[in-house]
Every structure is written in C-alpha cells, then in structure tokens.
Amino acid sequence: MIPEWTRLAAANPDTRSTASSTPIFVDNGAAIRGTDPVAYFTEGEPVQGLREFAYEWEGATWLFASAEHRDRFADNPRAYAPQYGGFCAYGLSYGALVSTMPDAWSIVDGKLYLNYSIAIQNQWKEDTTGNIDRANLNWLDLSSK
C-alpha cells in the first residue's frame, strides 16, 4: 500500500523535467532545488548553488557553489547526481515520484540519496538496503517507459 504522504507530495507538477526521458526533480527551474550535488561529497552538507555556475544535464539545470564543483560534475555527472533523479528514495521504494528537501540526504556506498523530509529519511533508514533494492526496481520500471 502506498502511503498517503507519497500521493500528496507527488502532486506538485513542477517537480519533473520534461526535456529528458529520465525524470529529474526540478523546483524553481533548478534540479534538486538548486542545491550543489558535489557539495554533499566534498563539504558533507547541502550547499546552495549559484546560477553563475550552472550546468545543463539530462534536460535540467544543475547549480553549483563554485566553478570547481561544476567542472567535477561535468566530468562525471553520474558520480555526483543523486539517485532516482533527485526524487525521494523512500518514495521510489513505493513506486512514487516524490519531491525532496536538501537537508534530508545520505551517501550510501558512494551514492547520494535524497528524501522528502528528515522524518521520512528516518523511516527510509530503518531498512536502507531493502528500500534501495525496491527503489532500484521501481526506477528501472519507470525509466523504461
């Protein structure tokens, strides 16, 4: 059964990039609310990106805190981009595309995962491996359509 919060959170029509066949969480014209994805790895925390360091990838605009971060991402986007296009990892484990917040994040086995909220992230962490396995299957199914 899909939790009610996933239906409510997924209702925001501005959370999908239509220019790419792979859905990317976009809010106010920027992927993952304009947060620098490289900063999660280098700074250990979310850092707001700047438009002057924008980079287009997978049909979405990604923002970075510095030219160095932008260039690192451009060299290997899949190493830094969040899993599931930046949608909530827990929501994907239920098959739902749900928005995320920058402060609800984890790096597991070198991959960045975002969640809808800290409370949802805590639920996701109760079975991280199982949730990732289910989300991977749902993402594969979603991406193949």
Image (cartoon, rainbow, N blue to C red):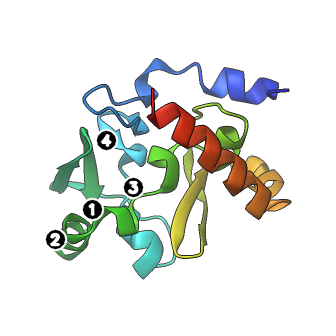
Q: Is residue 99 visible?
A: no
Instruction: Give SS at disc 2.
Output: helix
Give the mark nearer the N terminus: 2 vs 4: 4
**SS for tag 3?**
loop
Could you tell me which residue is drawn at 41 percent across and 44 percent down? 33
Amino acid beneath label 2: Ala
Badge 2 crowding class, 10 Å Cα cut-off, few under 14, some 14 to 19, many 20 or more, is some
What numbered label is drawn on residue 64? 1
In the image, residue 33 above or below residue 14: below
Image vertical order of residue 107 relative to residue 144, above or below: below
The picture places residue 104, in percent across and down from the top left corner, at: 63, 56
Q: Label for residue 67?
A: 2
Disc with the residue nearer the chain's start (2 vs 3)? 3
Identity, as a three-letter code, of the amino acid under mark 4: Ala
Which residue carries the number 4 mark?
30
Q: CA distance from mark 2 to mark 3?
A: 14 Å
- Of residue 42 and residue 74, the one placed in the foreground of this image is 74
- Seen in the image, is 18 located left or right of residue 75? right
Task: Give residue 137's quadrant in the image.
Answer: top right
Name the residue rendered at 45%, 26% in the picture: 145
